[in-house]
């Protein structure tokens, strides 16, 4: 998903605003800001450095009036595999404090995506999983997925709860019954299924994903910016108060649950690719 795409071969190269680190940011001449999740060896899992990098990216875009649309992509084989389970497990008894801080950063990033004036397009390939992957998907205005993309909530699989406001945004996108199934049973959802249930906007051929996602972002960038920003604000304001209200409770419960033996067992089971044995403690 390297940032070299352009419809106009004579267009100048994008301006690199953040060119190193776990979250990269460039700005194309047509006003499309390209955010690239850049931990490919870890499936773009969200550790603290990635979360802080995404926060910096969001702050930069909020303060740059040239940004007319945003495209988020992931480097490597996956869009975002959620929280970094190896990092989580390595924290031992200090995990609740780490989770409390990490969840706060993720919630801020999700809120800033919703509150950006510029519409946000996420292009999903591979897996979008966990609070990170699903959180970014549910906080985007548009989601384009390749045909082989897959979606997974995954929080209860490691004895935790959804975060990034997903307990509210997912329910509004797909309905209460379907959200309950997704969050409690953790099915792996295909791109076609995600489209049918309203989780994503469109499905395109894998080899056309970047081109089609850029095309959509450029179409939005050519629109009336104030009208698009106002429409986006009206749409998100409809559930804004409920998202804001749920996030502190998500944070509290996530920190509490991450201190239990079941959370360590769930994380170990994911890493070891086995079925967890939860004890309720």
Image: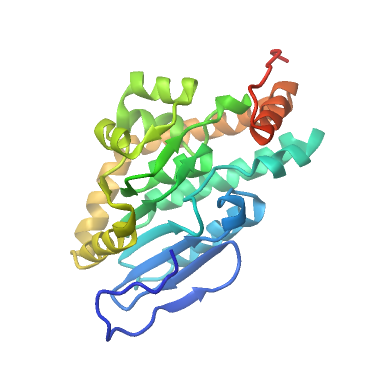
Q: Image quarter for residue 32?
A: bottom left
Of all residues, the one furthest to the top in this rendering is 279
Residue in view at x 41 percent, y 39 percent = 150
Q: Who is closer to the viewer here, 212 or 217?
A: 212
Q: Is residue 38 left or right of residue 124?
A: right
Q: Locate the N terminus by quadrant.
A: bottom left
Q: Is residue 20 above or below residue 234?
A: below
Tell me residue 3's x, y (percent).
Answer: 42, 71
Q: How is the image coloured?
A: rainbow
Q: How many marks?
A: 0
Q: Who is closer to the viewer here, 116 or 210?
A: 210
Of all residues, the one furthest to the right in this rendering is 93
Residue in view at x 56 percent, y 50 percent = 43
Q: Image quarter for residue 13?
A: bottom left
Q: Is residue 258 above or below residue 12?
A: above
Q: Is residue 238 left or right of residue 84?
A: left
Residue in view at x 50 percent, y 63 percent = 57
Tell me residue 184's x, y (percent).
Answer: 48, 20
* Residue 178 visible within the image: yes
Q: Is residue 118 above or below residue 259?
A: below
* Residue 256 visible within the image: no
Q: Locate the C terminus by quadrant.
A: top right
Tell me residue 62's x, y (percent).
Answer: 42, 63
Residue in view at x 54 percent, y 74 percent = 19
Q: Who is closer to the viewer here, 241 or 213?
A: 213
Tell me residue 239's x, y (percent).
Answer: 34, 35
Q: Who is closer to the viewer here, 128 or 205?
A: 205
């Amino acid at each position: 998903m390297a940032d070299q795409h352009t419809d106009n071969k004579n267009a100048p190269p994008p301006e690199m605003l953040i060119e190193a680190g776990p979250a990269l940011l460039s700005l194309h001449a047509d006003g499309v800001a390209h955010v690239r999740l850049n931990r490919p060896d870890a499936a773009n899992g969200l550790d603290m450095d990635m979360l802080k990098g995404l926060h910096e990216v969001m702050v930069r875009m909020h303060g740059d009036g040239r940004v007319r649309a945003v495209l988020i992509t992931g480097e490597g084989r996956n869009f975002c595999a959620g929280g970094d389970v190896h990092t989580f497990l390595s924290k031992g008894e200090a995990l609740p404090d780490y989770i409390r801080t990490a969840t706060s950063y993720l919630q801020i990033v999700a809120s800033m995506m919703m509150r950006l004036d510029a519409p946000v397009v996420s292009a999903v390939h591979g897996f979008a999983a966990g609070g990170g992957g699903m959180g970014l998907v549910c906080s985007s205005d548009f989601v384009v997925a390749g045909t082989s993309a897959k979606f997974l909530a995954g929080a209860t699989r490691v004895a935790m709860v959804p975060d990034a406001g997903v307990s509210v945004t997912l329910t509004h996108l797909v309905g209460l019954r379907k959200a309950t199934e997704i969050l409690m049973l953790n099915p792996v959802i295909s791109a076609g299924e995600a489209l049918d249930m309203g989780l994503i906007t469109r499905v395109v051929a894998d080899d056309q994903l970047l081109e089609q996602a850029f095309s959509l972002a450029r179409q939005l960038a050519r629109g009336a910016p104030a009208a698009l920003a106002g429409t986006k604000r009206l749409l998100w304001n409809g559930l804004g108060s409920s998202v804001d209200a749920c996030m502190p409770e998500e944070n509290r419960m996530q920190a509490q649950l991450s201190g239990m033996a079941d959370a360590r067992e769930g994380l170990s089971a994911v890493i070891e690719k086995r079925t967890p044995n939860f004890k309720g403690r």
